[in-house]
Image: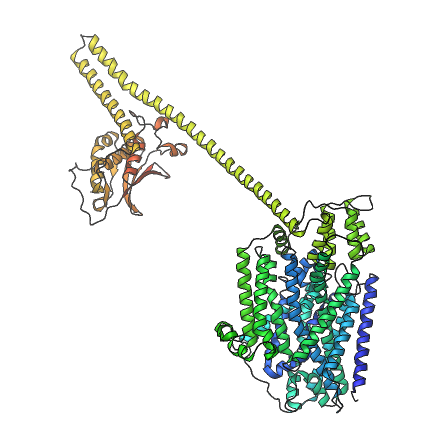
Amino acid sequence: MALTVPGLVAVSVLYATLLFWVAAWAERRAEAGQLTWIRSPLVYTLSISVYCTAWTFYGAVGSAARSGLEFAAIYIGPSLVFFGWWVLLRKLVRIGRAERITSIADLISSRYGKSSALGVLVTLLALLASTPYIALQLQSLTLSFDALTTSDGGAAPPRTLTALSFAAGLALFAIFFGTRRIDANERHPGVVAAIAVEAVVKLGALLAVGLFVVVATSGPPLALPSEPVFTPRWATLTFLSATAIICLPRMFQVVVVENSAERHLATAAWAFPTYLLLISLFVLPIALAGAVQLPEGSNPDLYVLTVPLSFGQEGLALFAYLGGFSAATSMVVVSTIALSTMVSNHIAVPIWLRLHPTPSSGDLRAAILTSRRTAIAVIMCFGYLYFLQTQGASGLASIGLRAFAGIAQILPALLGGLFWHGATRAGAISGILTGLAVWMWTLFLPSFGAQFLSVDTLADGPWGLSMLTPTALFGSTITDPLVHSVYWSLSLNTAVFVAVSMLSRQSPLEQAQARAFVDAFSTTPARVYQGRIATAEDLYALAARILGPETARRLFARIAKAQGTAKQLPDANDDLILAVERELAGSVGSASAHALVAQIAKGGQISVDQMIRMADETAQIVEYSHRLERQSKVLERTAAELRTANARLTALSAQKDAFLSQVSHELRTPMTSIRAFAEILRDHGDVNAGDAQRFLTIIHDESQRLTRLLDEILDLSVLESGRARLDIDTVPMRAAIERAASATEGLRHAQGIRLELPDDAGEVLVRADINRLAQVIINLISNAVKYGTSTDPNVALSLSEREGLIALDVIDRGPGIPEEHREHVFEKFARLGEMTLAGSAGLGLPISRQIARALGGDLVLVPTEKGACFRLTIPRAEAAEAPRAVGGSRGLA
């Protein structure tokens, strides 16, 4: 059949009418509350296919014909995002429902303290990045229309007129079904239903053309360009296509805003990648068939249409045309709706608020809808103007990639806001502005050729500054313009975002929103406002002006029921204010809703900045309270430490008293004996010579005992004060051991105890005072002899080296020291009952330990299964040092 211009126009109008009918039917079902089929996971998945635009339908085949397998990256990126939906998409949907998010600009604005400036910036970036993409759809529609209407030799209308007609028709469709009313959730069931139908049509058309090509074509295959696959460009395309799923306004609209149930993501996680696989299944066969069947110089972007036409299959070509028509129109409609919502919420409404600083009566819905309809018309005009400037200058794929690279500048602020508590508004604005400037300079403006940048600037940089050359920024050697732009724009964007965030400070509102976003899956939601004052009547009037009287009435009735009040209006507490603000956010965005409620909640006199300053003061009070709590805890710990120290001092005082009592007793005993026997000798002159000799011997022995006790007390005092004079030199350990063995020989023989000496003592040199060292060893052997009584009377000495110290262990086979007394054996103030040395105050071990420490070592009690083991450690001397000559000693017993 011949495809004339009137016939193709009639087919286009009939198909558009069908889409209008589907959308209208879905809208009626939604108004009646019958959304079961429309809100199903299948329709949700098909709506996500708006990703597959004319770029995918036509441009993928063209890309395959030009660059081989490069086109596959456009499908791999989104598939990876949906395979990992649990990490990112689930969080986006959860936040979108909790915060009543209406767009990608609203999400970022809400995360960073509901910043109006950030919302405007993201909106402008989205407009700038989406303009080339809308132009791409107009170009594809125009090229496909021309291809069909000229197939029979007829003349096609001027492309500018064709593009203008498509732009006008798509604008009317978007206005009619995208701006019919202000919806509390910004969902559009009619548009979603129409997109689902278009998704089936474009998939069916591409599969039909592919199957025909596989069955109908024959002959030797013609190889496509064998470009390397896994290159930096391929990685860049994969990254950009993955980014587009969450950053493109239309994708955010269908994935997040239009999502009615989080569980639908689980279905889309496998169903959407399957859709992408099917729609890309015959890309290579169609590209190969076009290269073989069509004459040289044919446009590869139109192979989907021109290959069936070359076989005389006008019906199949018409079906393919409708598939491409579906791919282009679905993208334009959803994009213009999403962008108009962003323009209305972040530009038009804030301007209205500035012009009306105090609340006024009247229905604001008409003004909001008018702003959105105007925005759709203006956006389509921008797309048409870009089409006029660039038509035919580049392939469809290259235009789409420019848009992807531009919208990717949102990514650092988006991911940082979702996963980093410290990301700040200043960092987000700085990063996006940096990335936007670099993207425009390196990719967007050069796409116009010499219209905006001169040939010299493009080649050598502005004013001859080669470091600023758009295609070789900072002297870069990256030859691919897309890879070059993406690398520098996102690298600088991310670096500035992180640096400024670390250097800037969050406001309390930013901190609250950061917790709400980063901890989106927390069971305890973050509260943002407290203590605001408003009347229920004012809040109801505001809600009615935005949502409509009936929707506002249902909202307030629901809140009143939740409060358990019998009044017609609920109590105007902070929960009501927050509920109204969140409900309005679903219609006008979080930043505008925040500003609108601020007018009502503060009598129209307190601005958003003032509210944030109040929040700052509250935060300072809370911080001061926290400091007081921390100081209180420190004081409590200090008091506990003082109580512990006081208890210790009390115990030491008691030990001191016990020590003085013991010393007094020990001093009194010999003095009593001396005095008693001296009085006998003085008062009884008839004492015989034998008794007198015996009495004098007792007096002498007790005097020595008294002197020894006093020497121990004085010696301990000198050692503890650090005034002891030590003659430290290099001495052989054996000399000190032999001197101690000789000094205790009589005591050992009297007790019948053997002494085992170490065999290797002769070669060991230590740094010590030989006399003091021998004193310690004598004391240890004496204690072992006195308290080491057993069936196996034996005292053993052993030597070892431990970390540069010589360790001498003195071990007995006696009953040992009870567990409860082990920690007190070295305390000079402690009395251990039967453990105390006879004839002394038990000061031998404290004195020995003080000597050991003065020599640079230590004396400790080592746990053993039987008997007692005291370990003396002394610093080892270097082998090259000559030992000091010491006096001889008697042989060892």
> In the rendered view, does 63 fall on the left or right side of 562?
left
Please tell me in which quadrant of the rendered image residue 308 appears: bottom right
Where residue 840 sits in the image (x, y, percent)?
29, 25
Q: Which of 831 and 712 lies nearest the eye of the viewer?
A: 712
Q: Is residue 793 visible?
A: no
- Which of 874/871 is in front? 874
Could you say where residue 395 lies in the image, as x and y percent from the top left?
A: 63, 81
Q: x%, y% of residue 841?
A: 31, 26
Q: Measuring 27% from the left and 25% from the top, which residue is drawn there?
A: 709
User: Measured along the vertical axis of the image, is residue 829 above or below residue 769?
Assistant: above
- Specify the quadrant that holds the C terminus: top left
Q: Which one is nearer the viewer's eye here, 324 or 886?
A: 324
Which quadrant, please, contains the N terminus?
bottom right
Q: Using the rendered image of the protein, determine whether residue 261 is visible from the camera's viewpoint.
A: yes
Q: Give the left or right position of residue 670, taking residue 815 as reference.
A: left
In screen coordinates, is 249 left or right of 678?
Answer: right
Structure colour scheme? rainbow
Please tell me in which quadrant of the rendered image residue 406 appears. Answer: bottom right
| Count of marks, rendered view | 0
Residue 662 position, x and y percent, is 34, 23
Q: Quadrant of residue 75?
A: bottom right
Q: Residue at x 53, y 67 (%)?
A: 491
Viewer-nearest residue: 806 or 104 = 104
**331 over 659 or under it: above or below:** below
614 lies left or right of 156 = left
